[in-house]
Amino acid sequence: DRSPSRGLGDVYKRQTLHHTEAMFKTAYILRTDLHSEYDDTNYNQSYRGNVDFVYSNVLLAKGMTEKYKSPEYLINSIETDKAVKWKTSSICRDFMFNIDNSFVKKNDDNAINKEETKNFIKSNLDDFFYSHFSKDGYAVIYAVHFNDVNNNHKEDNFHVHAIVLCNQFDEESKTYHTKSYLDNEGNWVYRNSLDDRNCLLYTSPSPRDGLL
């Protein structure tokens, strides 16, 4: 039998993008409208509709309360935090990967059953993003999309968009770490461990990795 974990290994790689506009990108993958408190701008993407949208989730860093489950609140909390200091600093991983189309659950009319599809893959995706990012203090927003003939695509395209927010959340202080600090000898130390890996190409988990 095949399982979602095997299907998640059938992907292609894409170079990550650094420091892009977090609120716009999130509104785009969620097919919704979001407001940035930093620049008092509305990022409206609901006009795209939700035909290709299957589901989304937010994986919180340890110590974050349920209010951070709102993507709008989560991103605003980073962009307006004094430790961050500038807009567009909040994305340090922005990537997409394909999932094998055979894991799409369909109805008798061959249309996708979004709820069954979500139930089939969600725990695997949540485990992957938690083990790679959230357990180390980084929040993740991801959305699953599916394109087929019902939204003007010639072939099925089952894929995941994921955004990893850069600033580490401190579980004890309930706030974000600054990105850099002075050590005891007066040297600047760059804190962000994800940007230390900025040359890495991320792929989805594979059974060989023991991730799922």
Image (spheres, rainbow, N blue to C red):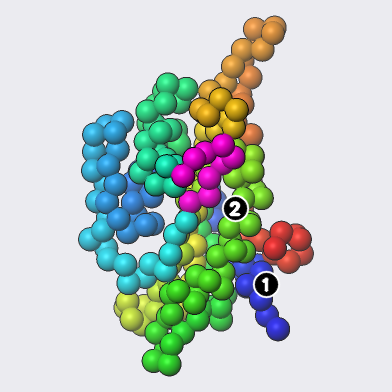
Camera-side mark, 1 or 2: 2
Q: Secondary structure at mark 2?
A: helix
Image quarter for residue 126?
Answer: bottom right
Tell me the residue that label 1 is attached to: 6
Q: Magenta span covers which residues? A: 58-66
Please say whether residue 12 is visible from this viewpoint: no
Residue drawn at 65 percent across, 7 percent down: 186
Please say whether residue 178 is visible from this viewpoint: yes
Q: Classify the position of the C terminus by image quarter.
A: bottom right
Q: Secondary structure at mark 1?
A: helix
Tell me the residue that label 2 is attached to: 129
On whether residue 76 falls in the magenta region, the answer is no
Residue 207, above or below 84: below
Answer few, some or many: residues within 10 Å of disc 2's Cα (few below 14, many 20 plus, some between 14 and 19). Answer: many
| Residue type at the position of mark 1 | Arg
| Residue type at the position of mark 2 | Phe
On whether residue 65 falls in the magenta region, the answer is yes
- Tell which residue pokes out farthest to the front in this image: 66
Q: Position of residue 77 (x, y in %)?
A: 40, 33
Q: Earlier in the sequence, mark 1 or mark 2?
A: 1
Horizontal side of residue 24 vs 106, given as left or right: left
Q: Position of residue 62 (x, y in %)?
A: 59, 40
Residue drawn at 62 percent across, 60 percent down: 204
Image quarter for residue 187?
Answer: top right
Numbered circles on residues, count: 2
Horizontal side of residue 46 vs 70, given as left or right: left
Magenta region, main secondary structure: loop
Q: Classify the position of the N terminus by image quarter.
A: bottom right
Image quarter for residue 68?
Answer: top left
Q: CA distance from mark 1 to mark 2?
A: 16 Å
Residue 157, above or below 107: above
Q: Position of residue 23 (x, y in %)?
A: 35, 43
